[in-house]
Image: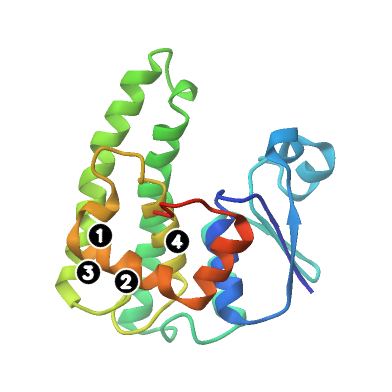
Amino acid sequence: MIELHYYPSNASFAPHLLLEELGVPFTLRTVNRAANEHKSAAYLKLNPNGLIPVLVDGELVLYETAAILLHLADVHPGFAPAPGTPERAQYYKWMVWLTNTLQAMLIHYFYPERMASDAAEVKARAEAQIAPMLDQLETELARHGGPWFLGQHYTAVDPLVFMLCRWTRMQARPAKARPYLAAYLQRVLQRPATQRVVQREGLADPVY
Protein backbone atom coordinates (compact mmCIF):
# COMPACT_ATOMS: atom_id res chain seq x y z
CA MET A 1 0.00 0.00 0.00
CA ILE A 2 1.28 3.44 -0.92
CA GLU A 3 1.52 5.92 1.94
CA LEU A 4 1.72 9.68 1.47
CA HIS A 5 2.97 11.61 4.47
CA TYR A 6 1.28 14.95 4.02
CA TYR A 7 -0.13 18.09 5.58
CA PRO A 8 -3.01 20.07 4.05
CA SER A 9 -2.04 22.85 1.66
CA ASN A 10 1.65 21.90 1.70
CA ALA A 11 3.90 20.59 -1.07
CA SER A 12 2.23 17.22 -0.59
CA PHE A 13 -0.79 18.66 -2.42
CA ALA A 14 0.60 17.83 -5.88
CA PRO A 15 1.36 14.14 -5.12
CA HIS A 16 -2.02 13.91 -3.41
CA LEU A 17 -3.66 15.14 -6.62
CA LEU A 18 -1.77 12.68 -8.78
CA LEU A 19 -2.53 9.74 -6.50
CA GLU A 20 -6.21 10.58 -6.69
CA GLU A 21 -5.99 10.81 -10.49
CA LEU A 22 -4.25 7.43 -10.67
CA GLY A 23 -7.09 5.72 -8.83
CA VAL A 24 -4.70 3.40 -6.96
CA PRO A 25 -5.13 2.53 -3.28
CA PHE A 26 -3.17 4.82 -0.98
CA THR A 27 -3.16 5.94 2.63
CA LEU A 28 -2.65 9.46 3.91
CA ARG A 29 -0.45 9.89 6.97
CA THR A 30 -0.84 13.34 8.49
CA VAL A 31 2.37 15.04 9.55
CA ASN A 32 1.22 17.71 11.99
CA ARG A 33 3.27 20.78 11.15
CA ALA A 34 1.58 22.73 13.92
CA ALA A 35 3.09 20.28 16.40
CA ASN A 36 6.44 20.29 14.57
CA GLU A 37 6.12 16.61 13.71
CA HIS A 38 8.08 17.12 10.49
CA LYS A 39 11.12 17.79 12.69
CA SER A 40 10.61 14.77 14.93
CA ALA A 41 13.19 11.98 15.09
CA ALA A 42 10.75 9.52 13.56
CA TYR A 43 10.00 11.74 10.56
CA LEU A 44 13.64 12.69 10.05
CA LYS A 45 14.36 9.00 9.51
CA LEU A 46 12.09 9.23 6.47
CA ASN A 47 13.30 12.63 5.28
CA PRO A 48 16.44 14.04 6.91
CA ASN A 49 15.54 17.47 5.51
CA GLY A 50 12.43 17.60 7.71
CA LEU A 51 10.21 18.59 4.79
CA ILE A 52 6.82 17.40 3.57
CA PRO A 53 5.97 15.21 1.65
CA VAL A 54 7.34 11.68 1.86
CA LEU A 55 6.03 8.78 -0.20
CA VAL A 56 6.41 5.22 1.07
CA ASP A 57 5.85 2.67 -1.70
CA GLY A 58 6.72 -0.79 -0.43
CA GLU A 59 10.41 -0.70 0.46
CA LEU A 60 10.88 2.63 -1.28
CA VAL A 61 10.97 5.80 0.81
CA LEU A 62 11.01 8.87 -1.42
CA TYR A 63 11.03 12.59 -0.75
CA GLU A 64 11.05 15.68 -3.01
CA THR A 65 7.70 16.49 -4.61
CA ALA A 66 8.88 16.35 -8.23
CA ALA A 67 10.67 13.03 -7.66
CA ILE A 68 7.49 11.57 -6.20
CA LEU A 69 5.45 12.74 -9.19
CA LEU A 70 7.99 11.32 -11.65
CA HIS A 71 8.06 7.98 -9.82
CA LEU A 72 4.29 7.64 -9.67
CA ALA A 73 3.92 8.45 -13.36
CA ASP A 74 6.55 5.84 -14.25
CA VAL A 75 4.98 3.10 -12.13
CA HIS A 76 1.43 3.88 -13.23
CA PRO A 77 1.48 4.62 -16.99
CA GLY A 78 -0.77 7.15 -18.62
CA PHE A 79 0.43 10.37 -17.01
CA ALA A 80 3.68 11.00 -18.87
CA PRO A 81 4.78 11.06 -22.52
CA ALA A 82 6.59 8.02 -23.86
CA PRO A 83 10.30 7.76 -22.91
CA GLY A 84 12.74 8.85 -25.58
CA THR A 85 10.33 11.21 -27.30
CA PRO A 86 10.63 15.00 -27.65
CA GLU A 87 7.46 15.25 -25.58
CA ARG A 88 9.14 13.34 -22.77
CA ALA A 89 12.08 15.75 -22.90
CA GLN A 90 9.71 18.71 -22.53
CA TYR A 91 8.00 16.91 -19.64
CA TYR A 92 11.37 16.60 -17.86
CA LYS A 93 12.21 20.22 -18.61
CA TRP A 94 9.03 21.60 -17.13
CA MET A 95 9.11 19.31 -14.09
CA VAL A 96 12.65 20.44 -13.28
CA TRP A 97 11.95 24.11 -14.03
CA LEU A 98 8.85 24.16 -11.87
CA THR A 99 10.58 22.70 -8.83
CA ASN A 100 14.02 24.26 -9.30
CA THR A 101 13.02 27.75 -10.45
CA LEU A 102 9.42 28.68 -9.64
CA GLN A 103 9.00 26.64 -6.44
CA ALA A 104 12.41 27.73 -5.16
CA MET A 105 11.48 31.39 -5.58
CA LEU A 106 8.10 30.83 -3.95
CA ILE A 107 9.93 29.47 -0.91
CA HIS A 108 11.82 32.76 -0.67
CA TYR A 109 8.47 34.57 -0.93
CA PHE A 110 6.90 32.57 1.91
CA TYR A 111 9.98 32.36 4.15
CA PRO A 112 11.94 35.58 3.47
CA GLU A 113 13.34 35.67 7.00
CA ARG A 114 15.49 32.66 6.11
CA MET A 115 17.39 34.75 3.57
CA ALA A 116 18.01 38.12 5.23
CA SER A 117 17.10 40.30 8.18
CA ASP A 118 15.08 42.61 5.90
CA ALA A 119 12.34 40.05 5.24
CA ALA A 120 9.98 42.56 3.62
CA GLU A 121 12.50 43.42 0.92
CA VAL A 122 13.26 39.75 0.24
CA LYS A 123 9.55 39.00 -0.09
CA ALA A 124 8.99 41.93 -2.45
CA ARG A 125 11.98 40.96 -4.62
CA ALA A 126 10.83 37.36 -4.74
CA GLU A 127 7.34 38.38 -5.86
CA ALA A 128 8.85 40.58 -8.54
CA GLN A 129 10.84 37.63 -9.88
CA ILE A 130 7.86 35.25 -9.70
CA ALA A 131 5.78 37.47 -12.01
CA PRO A 132 7.79 36.79 -15.21
CA MET A 133 7.89 33.09 -14.32
CA LEU A 134 4.09 33.06 -14.30
CA ASP A 135 4.19 34.95 -17.61
CA GLN A 136 6.32 32.09 -18.95
CA LEU A 137 3.61 29.58 -17.99
CA GLU A 138 1.01 31.80 -19.63
CA THR A 139 3.07 31.99 -22.82
CA GLU A 140 3.42 28.22 -22.99
CA LEU A 141 -0.32 27.65 -22.64
CA ALA A 142 -1.01 30.28 -25.30
CA ARG A 143 1.58 28.75 -27.62
CA HIS A 144 0.04 25.29 -27.89
CA GLY A 145 -3.59 26.13 -27.07
CA GLY A 146 -4.24 22.73 -25.48
CA PRO A 147 -6.33 22.17 -22.36
CA TRP A 148 -3.46 20.89 -20.20
CA PHE A 149 -0.02 22.22 -19.55
CA LEU A 150 1.79 19.96 -22.02
CA GLY A 151 -1.01 20.12 -24.56
CA GLN A 152 -3.77 17.60 -25.15
CA HIS A 153 -3.03 15.20 -22.29
CA TYR A 154 -3.18 15.68 -18.52
CA THR A 155 0.17 14.58 -17.09
CA ALA A 156 2.07 14.52 -13.80
CA VAL A 157 3.20 18.07 -14.59
CA ASP A 158 -0.33 19.43 -14.14
CA PRO A 159 -0.65 18.82 -10.38
CA LEU A 160 2.64 20.65 -9.85
CA VAL A 161 1.64 23.61 -12.03
CA PHE A 162 -1.70 23.85 -10.26
CA MET A 163 -0.14 23.70 -6.79
CA LEU A 164 2.48 26.35 -7.50
CA CYS A 165 -0.01 28.66 -9.19
CA ARG A 166 -2.25 28.20 -6.17
CA TRP A 167 0.56 29.45 -3.96
CA THR A 168 0.49 32.82 -5.75
CA ARG A 169 -3.12 33.56 -4.83
CA MET A 170 -2.21 36.24 -2.25
CA GLN A 171 0.16 38.11 -4.54
CA ALA A 172 -0.69 41.41 -6.20
CA ARG A 173 -0.92 39.68 -9.60
CA PRO A 174 -1.54 36.01 -8.99
CA ALA A 175 -1.43 33.32 -11.64
CA LYS A 176 -5.18 33.55 -12.20
CA ALA A 177 -4.80 37.18 -13.35
CA ARG A 178 -3.49 35.84 -16.68
CA PRO A 179 -6.24 34.68 -19.08
CA TYR A 180 -4.78 31.39 -20.28
CA LEU A 181 -3.68 30.41 -16.78
CA ALA A 182 -7.06 31.41 -15.36
CA ALA A 183 -8.90 29.11 -17.78
CA TYR A 184 -6.38 26.33 -17.25
CA LEU A 185 -6.58 26.49 -13.46
CA GLN A 186 -10.36 26.33 -13.63
CA ARG A 187 -10.18 23.21 -15.81
CA VAL A 188 -7.86 21.52 -13.31
CA LEU A 189 -10.07 22.55 -10.39
CA GLN A 190 -13.13 21.07 -12.10
CA ARG A 191 -11.57 17.62 -12.43
CA PRO A 192 -13.27 15.17 -10.04
CA ALA A 193 -9.93 14.11 -8.54
CA THR A 194 -9.05 17.72 -7.76
CA GLN A 195 -12.43 18.29 -6.16
CA ARG A 196 -11.94 15.24 -3.93
CA VAL A 197 -8.51 16.40 -2.79
CA VAL A 198 -9.66 19.97 -2.15
CA GLN A 199 -12.49 18.64 0.00
CA ARG A 200 -10.29 16.13 1.84
CA GLU A 201 -7.65 18.74 2.62
CA GLY A 202 -10.27 21.29 3.65
CA LEU A 203 -8.98 24.05 1.39
CA ALA A 204 -10.93 27.28 1.64
CA ASP A 205 -12.04 29.45 -1.26
CA PRO A 206 -10.42 30.84 -3.24
CA VAL A 207 -8.54 27.61 -3.88
CA TYR A 208 -6.21 29.43 -6.24
In the image, farthest residue toward the front: 205
- Measure the alpha-carbon separation of dots 2 and 1: 8 Å
Q: What residue sits right under mark 3 in the picture?
A: 141
Mark 2 and mark 1 residues within 8 Å of each other at the beta carbon: yes
Mark 3 and mark 2 residues within 8 Å of each other at the beta carbon: yes
In the image, farthest residue toward the right: 42
Q: Report the disc number at residue 160.
A: 4
- Characterize the local packing of mark 3: few (<14), some (14-19) or many (20 or more) Cα atoms within 10 angstroms: many
Element assignment for label 3: helix
- Measure the alpha-carbon separation of dots 3 and 4: 15 Å
- Residue at image coords 80%, 71%: 58
Q: Amino acid at mark 2?
A: Phe
Q: 65 or 6: nearer the eye?
A: 6
Q: What residue sits right under mark 2 in the picture?
A: 149
On the image, the x and y values in percent for residue 144 come to 19, 77
Residue 87 in view here: yes
Q: What residue sits right under mark 1 in the picture?
A: 137
Q: Earlier in the sequence, mark 4 or mark 1?
A: 1
Q: Earlier in the sequence, mark 3 or mark 4?
A: 3
Q: Earlier in the sequence, mark 3 or mark 2?
A: 3
- Residue at image coords 40%, 61%: 162
On the image, the x and y values in percent for residue 87 come to 33, 80
- Characterize the local packing of mark 2: few (<14), some (14-19) or many (20 or more) Cα atoms within 10 angstroms: many
Question: Is 23 left or right of 59, judged from the image as shown?
Answer: left
